[in-house]
Image (cartoon, rainbow, N blue to C red):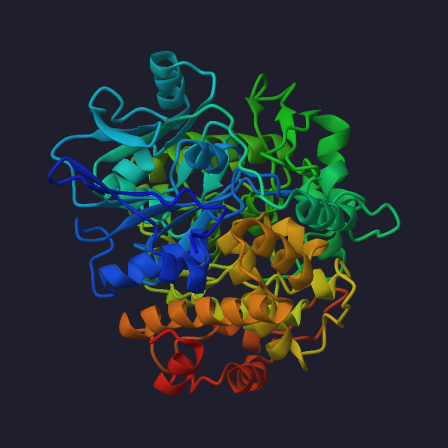
Amino acid sequence: MQLGGYANRMARVDLSAGKVGYEPLNEEWARKYIGARGLGVRYVMENGPQVDPLGPENILCFMNGPLTGGEANMSGRLAVVTKSPLTGTVTDSHMGGWSAARLRWAGFDGLLFTGKAAKPVYAYVHDGQVEIRDASDLWGKGIHETIKILQGRHGKADLSVMAIGPAGERLARFGAWINENDRASGRGGTGAVGGSKHLKAIVVKAVKNIHRAADRDAWKVAHQRALATIMDEKNVTSPRKGGLSVYGTNVLMNISSNMGALPTRNSMVTSFGEDAELLSGEYVKEHILVDDPTCHACPVACKKEVEIKQGPFKGLHMESVEYEPAWSVGANCGNNDIASVAKMIDQCNDYGLDAIEIGHCFSVLMEATEKGYVTGEDAMQWGDYMAMVKGVEQIAFRQGIGDILAEGPARAAQKLGHPELAMTVKGQAIAAYDPRGLKGMGIAYATSNRGACHLRAYTPASELGLISFKTDPLDWKGKGELTKLLQDLSAFSDSLDLCKFSQFAEGAEEYAAQYSIVTGVPFTADEVLSTGDRIYNLERRYNNLAGFREGSDYLPERFLNEPSTMPGSEGQVCELPQMLEEYYHVRGWINGVVPDAKLKELGVI
């Protein structure tokens, strides 16, 4: 039986040869790994874990899932999957907007790029076809200008453009892909992989063509159930009822800071005090908010479009001030100026940089300056946002100290002679949650397969009471088991590919019902979690083969040995060893390595 929901068409693009081939979806893999993240990782595994991330042999996958572009709520996400030049692990990084839906409407489940073009090119995707076109005139341009040129060339209607900027072209290890909605495939350096291949952009032209489940009555029931959980006015933790719709993701700034769980000044402290209010979603709404745009099939509208009306950045109009980037170039760097935060996020969206990683580059440099490790023209003081704005450009174009920082905070700290300054795991920087105040985030960072990440297992959902299963943020017990559960659930939803915020309302039951009806494959909530388990173990298998073995799950020593001094978490450290023991037990791993017996049990090998 052919699976429903899929286009059943993949494109393989050999950029070295300038050739495009087409093949049906590998149905065996799709049944085991679903799509988007899971299926993308399977293609990356097939390509081999020993490749150079920036070599022509690396594969760069643009993947959607069986619900993408359809009727499911929050089904507008696309996964970019590859071997990361930042971490050396397998990575998947997701973007919202309309690119994923249009790729499905254009007739594809995924695009697979290998090789390196002799000169800059872009891929033009339409009507089940992929054309390789010259991008020499676009090379060196910012993403915003690139998108405008391509919109002029192909018509703005029914068009999505995903592009890299100068940072990706210059192989900045945290270069990102950005689309016309300023939505980023931000983490892991996927944009640098594009730059290494001379792939400047992917243009998708497709008229809206919603694919609908064959069983209309069954779909109506499943869809209404899922929508009801999202829109539940009686549930204060639902995405629509909660602060996401009103204040965006930045609703968390004050909450995290007040409970002593906001990493501040390179995690030397765990709260930004009263200054957190000046970066918050509440402050943005009151002073600079102008619109609430949304993604395909999303009733939440968490995105907050802003305009700066005074000061050195007056006139700036940009798509979104999100919590993670606002924290990274804000509290993490001792900067309370929201206008400069918006400016730097806009720069990252134009140059093509991960707006989480870049703040860590600055905070490493700032702490190194404070401690006298860096002096002279390379020094940077806490909160010096004009120097930071200049620094974003230096990183994108690899100028001066920016050439070192473009390697990412872990490599930069190593180069400066003080690797302990990098708040990274496996080379990727932590997000806006301090594991001394949110203990679950500690085990989640440490065991994330793509390096430190809050989205592999969003334990704050439980610790902050955003879901019905509430846990004590300062208690480590049970957090290993909680992390495993959320990792498995996220692996499945990322493979559908649904927005992460769907998990604040929907669970395995809702995911199973929607997947089953769309594909025609009977599926249970238990199978949702077992499939997520399989995907997570496939990723870990890849990393093990790539050299991440015993002891590769860790945290920066600061979180283990330097107690918090701030209210809400005062005196706390992160009990990682105890949580790891619990986590490995429920995973069935041996010190971070997956035994073959476990892989066989899950059908990975």
479 and 122: which one is in front? 122
Percent x, y for residue 572?
Answer: 68, 75
**Horizontal side of residue 170 vs 116, given as left or right:** right
**Horizontal side of residue 565 vs 585, given as left or right:** right
* Residue 581 in view here: yes
Percent x, y for residue 458?
Answer: 61, 61
User: Which residue sits at x=76%, y=68%?
Assistant: 469
**Horizontal side of residue 584 vs 123, given as left or right:** right
Q: Quadrant of the C terminus?
A: bottom left
* Residue 322 in the image: above or below residue 428: above
Percent x, y for residue 120?
Answer: 20, 30
Q: Quadrant location of residue 548?
A: bottom left
407 and 199: which one is in front? 199
Q: Quadrant location of residue 490?
A: bottom right
* Residue 546 in the image: above or below residue 502: below
Q: Quadrant location of residue 134?
A: top left
User: Which residue sits at x=74%, y=31%?
Assistant: 285
User: Which residue sits at x=44%, y=37%?
Assistant: 104
Percent x, y for residue 116?
Answer: 16, 41
Q: Quadrant of the N terminus?
A: bottom left
